Every structure is written in structure tokens, then in C-alpha cells.
Amino acid sequence: MIFLFTDFGREGPYVGQMQAVLARATPDVPVIDMVADLPAFDPKLASYLLPAYCQQAQPGDVVLAVVDPGVGTSRLCVALQADGVWYLGPDNGLLAHIVRRSRSCAAWQIDVPEASSATFHGRDVFAPVATTLAQGQKPMGVSIDPQTLDRAAWPDDLPAIIYQDRYGNLLTGLRVSTVPHLKSLYVSGASLPFVRTFGDVMRGTAFVYENANGLWELAVNGGSAAQVLGLRVGDQIELNS
């Protein structure tokens, strides 16, 4: 499979143009538009979402990830093989946590064809390479140290809101596996309790729970946590141990 992770949004032409390149070259390979609304222009926040939502990828699959405010500049285009899964994206930290959490990885710099658009490397650079990787070919380009793709100053877990879904639920950059023993989460002047699921609290109550992809998430039973708590993507949160 080829998984798309972008900040392009589904309402415009960008995802469709990438899908057209993929479908023409590899019509038998399923293309899954996994996330099209990653935090816009923010590879740091998106880097915490990427490993959480790539858990379904298996060796040989290709994850095409584009949050690329520096497109067309001197930043590198890279291919990364981590635990058998291929990742394509810009060298801006987006792949940092894939590198950090993998058991084995290797990376290559991808050449940018002269005919490529300066502002749409997702379509003109990454998508064509994704089709070759999906067919079992190795990437063409210079081998690089995958550790250079990490951003050491970024913490392993981020106590901040990194994503808001259509219900107003707020995902944090905190993994349950590494931040498991908390009594509550302090946000917007209140301590939110940790519960198992929505129905464990009364309607309109804000709480924190383990979401289906292993991240701590803020929610309101029957409502929007973003509205009730007055939070948005990028806001910091405080842990209570």
C-alpha cells in the first residue's frame, strides 16, 4: 500500500493530483489517503502524529508524508527505510520520530528533477519515487545518515495539542506507553480526569482518554473539547503526576 499523510486538505486539488501520478504508474497498488489535514506548515507537530497513525503500515509499504513549508529551498528530499517500511518526505524534522523510534533504518537523498515544480514536490518528486518503491525498487540517490533527519531538541513526547478532529477532540503529543501513570491533565484552569471511554462520564463533561492509536486525547462527551476548553492546535498542556 501507499499511505498519504499531508497537510493539503481534501477540499483542494493537491491530493488528487498526487493520487493521479500514483494510479497511473502503479494502478494495482492501493493508495490510502490516511490524513490530509496534518497541522499546516508545522512539521514538528505532524512528526508526533506520523508514527501513531503509521502503525498499520507493513514492510514494503510506502508512507508519502508532506508537510513542507520549505518546498523548493535547499532542504533535502529524502527516502527513509525504517523497520522495512518506506517513508518519503522533506528533511525538516517530519520524519524525526520515525527515525528515533525505529529499530533499524537507512536513508537516501532524492534528486529533484529539473522539470519539477518548485512548489509541488509532493506530486513531482515524492509521488514518482513512491511508485518505484512500491514496485520493490531501491531509491536512486546518495545514501545519507538517517540520524541527521532527527531533531534532537524535540522531546520524545510533547505536552501540547497536536491535532483537532472534526468532533473537536484534541490529540496530544503524549504516548500512553511512555506517559502512563497520570492522575489528571491540567488544562484551561481545570484538572481533567482520565477515563476509558466517552460513556464513562456525563454528557458535556471534559475528560482525557487513550485514543485508538495510543495517544492521550482530550474530549467532551457529546461536545467539542476545543470549544469547551478553549484550546487549539499548538497550545501547551500541564501534567499532574
Image: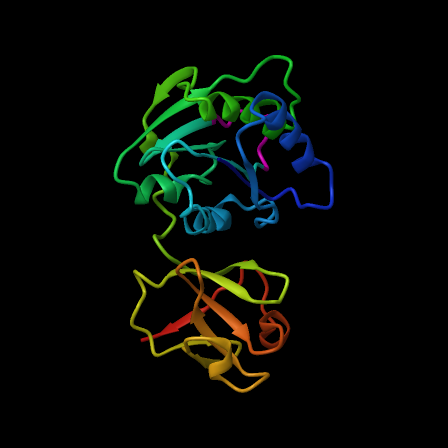
Q: Residue furthest left?
A: 103
Q: Looking at the picture, tell me which residue is in the foreground, 176 or 94.
A: 176
Q: How many marks?
A: 0
Task: Give the side of residue 201 with respect to residue 121, left or right.
Answer: left
The residue sitting at 45% across, 64% down in the picture is 211
Q: Which residues are magenta?
A: 69-77
Task: Give the side of residue 144 with respect to residue 212, left or right.
Answer: left
The residue sitting at 56% across, 22% down in the picture is 128
Q: Is residue 185 magenta?
A: no
Q: Position of residue 191 (x, y in %)?
A: 45, 81
The residue sitting at 54% across, 65% down in the picture is 170
Q: Position of residue 78 (x, y in %)?
A: 45, 27
Q: Residue furthest front?
A: 28
Q: Residue furthest bottom?
A: 202
Q: Position of residue 193 (x, y in %)?
A: 43, 81
Position above or below: 77 against 206: above
**Where does the C terminus fall, quadrant-wise?**
bottom left
The residue sitting at 53% across, 63% down in the picture is 235
Position above or below: 19 against 48: above
Give the main secondary structure, helix, strand or loop, of the magenta stretch.
loop
Q: Looking at the picture, tell me which residue is in the foreground, 205 or 156.
A: 205
Q: How is the image coloured?
A: rainbow
Position above or below: 202 against 21: below
Q: Position of residue 79 (x, y in %)?
A: 43, 27
Residue 234 picture quarter: bottom right
Q: Residue furthest top?
A: 114
